[in-house]
Image (tube, rainbow, N blue to C red):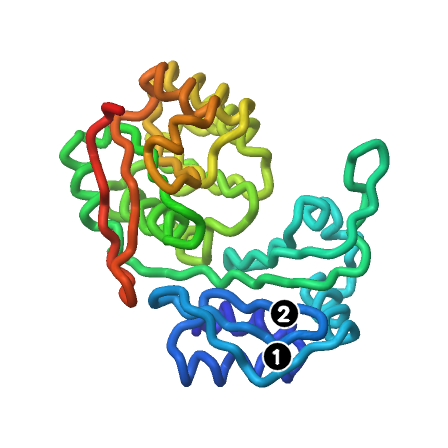
Amino acid sequence: MTEELLKVLKRLPPPILQAVIRGEQTFGEICEVHIRTGRRVVLTTVEGSFNRLTSLYTDAATVAESVASLCDRSLHAHMDTIREGYIALPGGVRVGVAGRAICEDGIISNIADITSLCIRIPARRWGIGREVFQKIRKGGFRESFLFYSPPGVGKTTLLRDLSRSLSEEAGLRVALIDSRCELACEELLSADHIDVYSGYPKGKAIELATRTMNPQYIICDEIGSLEEALSLLAVENAGVPLLASAHAFGLDQLLRRQNIRMLHRAGVFDHYVGITRESGTLRFRYDRWDPEA
């Protein structure tokens, strides 16, 4: 665990922090910490993403203290993202939240009685995307890729590594669209050729990056909305290649999504790449490269 991540996790109550540290020493690198009222803390490891239950139970007061500490004692400052279901922390750490929503006219105005937290600790595997990077290089750094997989396989980890390779190895200007503040990390924030758009709506960030930063690649995670699709169409018209990801269990399911199908018909992506991970390892397998579907 890096000092940067440890600094973030030190916001947790000491018993939970110690459970995470012991878990990593016993089971290996931890990628998720689930904290739920009245239940045991659950740790998920990177290798194979299997769960490890600790003996630590948390009550409502401990969960409330965890939320307050993670928010630096200011829930109000984080309320915009809490309404969207998460808390954004430094170093690309994102904390999912669940509880009782207070709605007005069908719009969430507040989240009360938070009962569940999912702390997602970003994996950093520099070089894990080497096979993909070589294919991008072979295409003259002009081709666009859409990576798809179910949640938790490693799309964000792959995009993070490709961002670094494009900037540091290829010397290309990269616009990193990090709407949920989980894609960028310390190494990327200090990279010479990466401009990070943190917290922007994806569609707006893509528009601004294309218009004002002269990127040679745009990278964004978890696309799918109509606004995002229209922005990606505009990027395609401007000639800026893209690396993006989307949730799907297969290509057929991916292309059943209306906005993704619109991008496909417009020829936005040169390659669709399905990602799986070998059981118990951090090695990726890629299902297909060709753009036909």
Q: In the image, residue 238 lies at what x, y percent?
A: 38, 16
Q: In the image, residue 180 lies at what x, y percent?
A: 56, 46
* In contact (CB < 8 Å): disc 2 and disc 1: yes
Tell me the residue at 46%/69% (across/down): 44
Q: How crowded is mark 1: few (under 14 residues within 10 Å), some or many (20 or more)?
A: many
**Displayed quadrant of residue 194:** top left
Quadrant (top left, top right, bottom left, bottom right) of the C terminus? top left
Left or right placement of residue 172 versus residue 95 in this view: left
Tell me the residue at 55%/23% (across/down): 227
Q: Residue furthest left?
A: 138
Left or right placement of residue 193 versus residue 18 in this view: left
Q: What residue type is labelled 1?
A: Ile
Q: Which is more toward the observer, 22 or 218?
A: 22
Res. 134 mark: none
**Displayed quadrant of residue 67:** bottom right
Residue of label 1: 16
Q: Which is more toward the observer, 230 or 198?
A: 230
Label 1 sits on a secondary structure element that is helix
Tell me the residue at 54%/23% (across/down): 226
Would residue 176 be seen by someone viewing this image from the given angle?
Answer: no
Q: Residues within 10 Å of mark 2 (few under 14, many from 20)?
A: many
Q: In the image, residue 89 lies at what x, y percent?
A: 60, 58
Q: Which amino acid does label 2 sit on?
A: Ile
Q: Distance between the residues labelled 2 and 1?
A: 9 Å
Residue of label 2: 35
Tell me the residue at 47%/22% (across/down): 258
Q: In the image, residue 215 lies at what x, y percent?
A: 38, 30
Q: Is residue 61 above or below residue 249?
A: below
Q: How many marks?
A: 2
Question: Which of the two labelled residues, at mark 2 and mark 1, occupies the earlier sequence position?
Answer: 1
